[in-house]
Structure formats: structure tokens, C-alpha cells
Image (cartoon, helix red, strand yellow):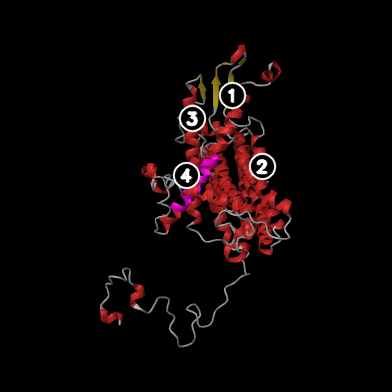
Amino acid sequence: MDTILRFIDAQTLVSALTLVIVVHVILVTVAYLIYLERKISAYIQDRIGPNRTGFDFGFPQLSFLKGLFGLGQSLADGLKFVLKEDYTPARVDKVLFTLAPIIVIIPALIGFAVIPWGGRWEIPTIPLPFGYEIPGGLVTVAGANINVGIVYMVAVASLGVYGITLGGYASNNKYSFLGGLRSTAQMISYEIPLGLSILATLLLVGSLVPERIIGYQTEHGWLIFSQPIAAVLFFTAILAEANRAPFDNAEAEQELVGGYHTEYSAMRFAMYFLAEYAHMVTSSAFFAMFFLGGWDVVPFMDDLPAQATGLLGIVVVLAKFGVFFGKVILLVSFMMLIRWSLPRFRYDQVMMMGWQGMIPVSLAVVVVTSFMVYLGATSMPEMLMANLALGLALILLQPLLPKQVSNKRIALYGSRFSPAEGDPALSYPTNPMAREDRPAEGTAQPSAMA
């Protein structure tokens, strides 16, 4: 017992508790993010969405939990996946086919480990039975308090694509294989601007320690104001990394049936589904840490104390976690809004945007940031003006760049865009009823509708 306790200090205990608690918080959040996306998509499409499944389970005694705004839908979906047949097609690589969903979800559930959710906490000595105790001290409320946290984050974020690629390869399906290849190419393309946008922020902060990145923003303002172009590049890259629309070419239903998970069912399919949302949560947490001040409520203000003390400090830690996680939920909701508002990019457009657009711009951001750091002009107004100047220069240079000539629209003879000679080019329906906002009641005259 003495030997074991000798290696357990306050930081080890807090890190272990943080890992266990945050993993379960993320798993519960992922379940209800699916419910949230269904409600958001329903609102955008003028529908109702899930609104009937409660927690009554058919028992009259629990009738007061019936309905409950449809909050039981996530539980019903989980039970459906558990009870469905876990079918394995013939001639698949059974080992890789089973390992692929596990490989894809592990990086999503370990990437958050370096995030300092609650800042620093001075905890007292913790007494244990039989006269043992765990010495107190100043700890960081994070799963892993390491100096190279950002390097760990970038390394772990790049591992998720292996599960997608292996799943597509092991499925013995051409559609799945093409989806895996698309995901691999997309990851390689967007890892570069992701890393360069992080490098631009680290040049300002001067540290790889996540806690110091938040501390820098507490003192100098959120980095989204100092590095707006890097923030846009980072957010776009994490959308592509998570295979979220408009970058979901790896599972394009119109082209690839279901992409890399076409042959999956039951819980193995559910693990891919959960991994996508877990990646959204983790990447949004990193965006909030890099550009939104972490646990700071309002920019340019030190809202919450940087260090909590004693047992009452748990209130400050929970408040910081609540603010931090609230920003994560808002960012995930914004990702959902993008999915249901923008059409999917073509695969060639995704590649062109990465290699001909985002990579050169991210390199320019790093060069401009390096120049400003060399001059010592790193205050928020100076960096904002430098970013605005860079954005203006990019807009002025854009007409001078070579034009894309491939994939031009072919004129379809007889269509409204290429009408036949003598035919009117009509872009609206000719039946007046089709132009009515209220076709059942109608506002046009019967004679006009005839």
C-alpha cells in the first residue's frame, strides 16, 4: 500500500478523475447531440423533429414521463443499434472489419486529455483510512498535464482516419474502398492548414502548454480577434477532419451509397456514428481553447480566477468547465447549422480548396505572424490590422490567379439555360397554382387557374 500511494499525488488523482468524468460527459453529450441535430434540421426544414419518445417505457406508472419533448429518442436509437443484427458480409477481412470502428472512436475519446477544463486548483491534503493520506498541492484540472499538449493533440487528431480507411478496405466493397481513399486524401490535405494555423497562434503565445494558451488570451484578448484568418482556416480544417458537410465526400450517399460504412450495421455502425460526433466535440474544444479564450466568459476581461483554492474551489472549477463546455456546444451547433445550410462540395473542389486555397493562405498567415513577432508588434489591434491587410491582399490577388477550366457546365440543349431557337426561356412554373403560397385556400382567381 505504501508503495502504491508513493506514486499517487494530487495531480494523478485529479487527472484520473478528470479523464473518467469527461469521457462520460462526452458520451452522454454525443447521444444528445444526435437529438439536437435532428431538432435543428427539423427547424431549418420547417418540421417538428423528435417529440414523442419519452422515458415512460410503456408503463402507466411512468405516464408523466411520456413525450418529454422527445428526449428519450437517443435512448431508443441506442437500443435499436444494440438489438439489431450485427451482420458481417462474406469475403470481408473479419479482423480489420471489426477493429476499424474501434480504431476510429479511440482517438476521439482520448484527444481531449490535454485540455485544461478547469484551470489550476490548490487542493488540500486528502486523508485516507488507516492513517494514509494523499498530499495536496497545485494541480491542473486536465486528463494529462504535459508540456507538449499541442503536439499530442495534432498527433491524435490524425489517427482517426486509419479506422475509416481500414473499414473501407476491409469491407470488400468498391463504394466503401473509394470512401476510405477519399477520407485519406482529405485528411492529408487538411492536416497541413490545420497545423499551420496552430503554428500561427503558437508564434504569438510562445508555448505548447494548453493552459498558457488560455492564460495568454486572458491577458491579451481572445485569439480569434488577433488571428481571424487562422481561426477560419482552423474551423474549416476541423470540419474536413470530422468528415462533416460540406466535406462529407467519404460517405456521399448520392455517389457512394454510404461510403466507408456501407457494409456496417448495428453497434459497429453506431461506433462510426458516435466517433463523428465525438470528433466534433473534441475539435470544438480545441477551437475554444485556441481562439475563444477557454473558460473566459467575456473577451478582454478576467472573469473567473485563474487559480481556485481549497474545497470551495470546486465551485470555480465547475464554473470554468461549464463555460468551456458551453462554448463547445455552441460550436457544435454551428457545425450542424452549416451542414443543413450548405451543399456538399464536389471531391475535386475539396482537393482544390485545400491545396490551391487553404494551404497557400495558411503559409501566408504564418509568414505575416512571424514578421509581426519579429517586429514585436503582437498586440491585438496590430495583429488584427495585419490580418485585415493580408485579407485585402488576397482579395486583390485572386483575379490574377489562373482560372479553373475543368468541369465546366455543358449546355443542355432545350433546357432553360440553353433554350432551343424560338422557345422562351422560362425559369418559373407556368401553372398559376404552382406559384401559390397557399395552394389549398388559394388567392388567384378561378378563371386564372383554369
Q: CA distance from mark 2 to mark 1?
A: 24 Å
Mark before the other along the chain sequence, 4 or 2 = 2
Q: CA distance from mark 1 to mark 4?
A: 28 Å
Magenta residues, start to end: 26-39
Residue 342: say if magenta: no
Q: Label 1: which residue? A: 139
Q: CA distance from mark 3 to mark 1?
A: 15 Å
Label 1: few (<14), some (14–19) or many (≥20) C-alpha neighbours in 10 Å? many
Most frequent secondary structure within the magenta stretch: helix
Q: Is residue 244 above or below residue 305?
A: below
392 relative to 86 in the view: left or right: left
- Which element is circle 4 on? helix
Mark before the other along the chain sequence, 3 or 1 = 1
Q: Is residue 184 above or below residue 148?
A: below
Q: Is residue 275 above or below residue 211?
A: below
Query: Residue 330 shows which numbered tag?
Result: 4
State which quadrant residue 376 falls in: top right
Quarter of the image where the N terminus is located: top right
Query: Residue 422 shows which numbered tag?
Result: none
Query: Residue 156 shows which numbered tag?
Result: 2
Q: In the rendering, at what x and y percent does residue 441 appear?
A: 27, 70
Q: In the rendering, at what x and y percent does residue 99 appear?
A: 70, 48
Q: Residue at x 54, y 23 (%)?
A: 121
| In the foreground, 127 or 449 | 127
Mark before the other along the chain sequence, 3 or 4 = 3
What amino acid type should be assigned to the residue bearing mark 2?
Answer: Val
What amino acid type should be assigned to the residue bearing mark 1?
Answer: Val
| In the foreground, 228 or 39 | 39
Q: In the rendering, at what x and y percent does residue 388 appear?
A: 52, 48
